[in-house]
Image (tube, grey):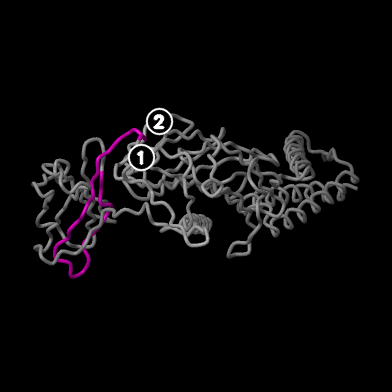
Amino acid sequence: MSYSAIKRLALIFGLAAWTTSALAQEPEETPGVHAPAGAPGAAPRPQRRSGGQTAPVNPHGAKKPGPRVIPAPDLPSGDIEIRLVSSKLDDVSNIDNQEVTLLVSKQSIERGNVDTTLTARTDSRGVARFSGQPTESDHIYDAQVAVGAARYSTGQFQFRKNDLGLRAIVPVYESSSSLDGLLLLTRTLIAIVPQDNMFVIDVLLRVENYGDVSWLPENVVFPLPAGFKALNIREPKADGHFEPSGDDAVKLAGTLAPGQHDLMFRFHLPTEGQSERSFKWATSLNTGMVRVILESGPTMRLSMPGFPDAEESRNQEGQRRLIAGRDFIGEKVRAPDSIEIKISGIPTPAPGRSVAVGLAAVLALGGIAQGVGRRRSSGPVRPELSKEDRDRAGELLLEELISLEQAFQQGAIGRKTHEQARRQLLEAFARLRAEHEPAEDAA
């Protein structure tokens, strides 16, 4: 993993931590949620303290028990027991006679991975067992079960040293594609990291399902900015996930069970050589919070109409960072249908550098023509540029080299841009010297 990738990963984890702390207080009424008063699974109301102050509520209201795998010393070695747990204790219809799929992957660097699929059905207690599975660390397992249109899985797991058997406990719920009666909240985090001639943009969507019914999203689409490239979806096979929607959007898909889900994808947005870049982002259903973080060079600015001015901070490496956001829950207002993100002050190649690169092309063509002329005639061929033009071109190239190094040291341009521009300028300077020396000899 590259250093820049590690920085982006650390940034995303930091954003996830921010959303957790942001849940420390919630308003008495959450705007825009699809739950009638008194609906089952509704979020608890804040408790009032004496003096009329609102006490902070438990920030983990959406953290329902999820699938978990635990050691089972009561099982024979190599046995994997899958136990479905219904959200309705008096109803076993969604756990009895369900087909459970166990995906087995044997990891091997030399021969490649070998994947095997096993199936079994649950009994009236919701239990299915796979006996005699390999316990070596190169075997990875994932149990999945479909209950109606919903799908639930354990995620990958494996035996550890001294484990005999393993028991996977998988909660299952009723499911619905409708939002009626559900209490959902989403929070959007957008991290923007400038790289050479583009922005790397990570979008983290946190979906919090406070009810007792799994939500199966339909037609929840997020259009991507025009000109985007390199879409990369994290964990596209998870129970709840993003997936491409046509050629220019992503959409929510899968099963979002009661609890908290963090979904993420990444794309690149070219700067197109412009000093300003803006794009709109559609807010999701029941957006409670939006935050945008820009890893910024010294000249860059971040603005979002309808949002407070971006605040400046520094990351652990001392790099400048701009942060803008709104807490719609705290404001007790509904989020707009879309937000606009504007970035200005993007470093662009200086005009002199374009002249220098163009000059390098002229010199290269001149050198080619000169070589052809020498082959056709034994007489010397004089260069087209006068001594004054050559001197001025040399000064221009040196000035651009100095400006280029200063921009790189200040973080205004990336390493790749720096290396490419530096190589072009040095090649142009070398050609200029090659043209200059024959002219002096001929004089």
Residue 257 placement (x, y as % from top left): 31, 45
Image coordinates of residue 323 in percent, x first then y, are 61, 53
Q: Earlier in the sequence, mark 1 or mark 2?
A: 1
Task: Tell me if 42 is positioned left or right of 172 in this view.
Answer: right
Extreme-bottom residue of the structure = 162
User: Based on the displayed image, in which of its 4 quarters is residue 164 positioned?
Assistant: bottom left
* Closer to us: 249 or 425: 249
- Asked if disc 1 and disc 2 are in contact, CB closer than 8 Å, the reply is no
Q: Residue at x 72, y 37 (%)?
A: 368
Label 1, secondary structure: give it.
loop
- Label 1 crowd (10 A; few <14 / some 14-19 / many >=20): many
Q: Nearer the viewer, residue 221 or 208?
A: 208
Residue ID for mark 1 = 182
Under circle 2, the secondary element is loop
In magenta, the rendered stretch is 152-180
Vertical position of residue 333 compared to residue 324: above or below: above
Q: Residues within 10 Å of mark 2 (few under 14, many from 20)?
A: few
The answer to which quarter of the image holds residue 20 is bottom left
Left or right position of 95 against 2: left
- Taking the view exactly as shown, the residue that stands out farthest to the front is 51
Placement of 166 over or under 34, stated as above or below: below
Residue 435 placement (x, y as % from top left): 80, 46
Is residue 357 among what the camera can see?
A: yes
Residues 138 and 91: in front is: 91
Which of 22 and 358 lies nearest the eye of the viewer?
Answer: 22
Amino acid beneath label 1 = Leu
Circle 1 or circle 2, nearest the eye = 1
Amino acid type assigned to the residue bearing label 2 in the image: Asn
Q: Looking at the image, which residue is at 11% across and 42% down?
A: 97
Q: Which residue is mark 2?
A: 219
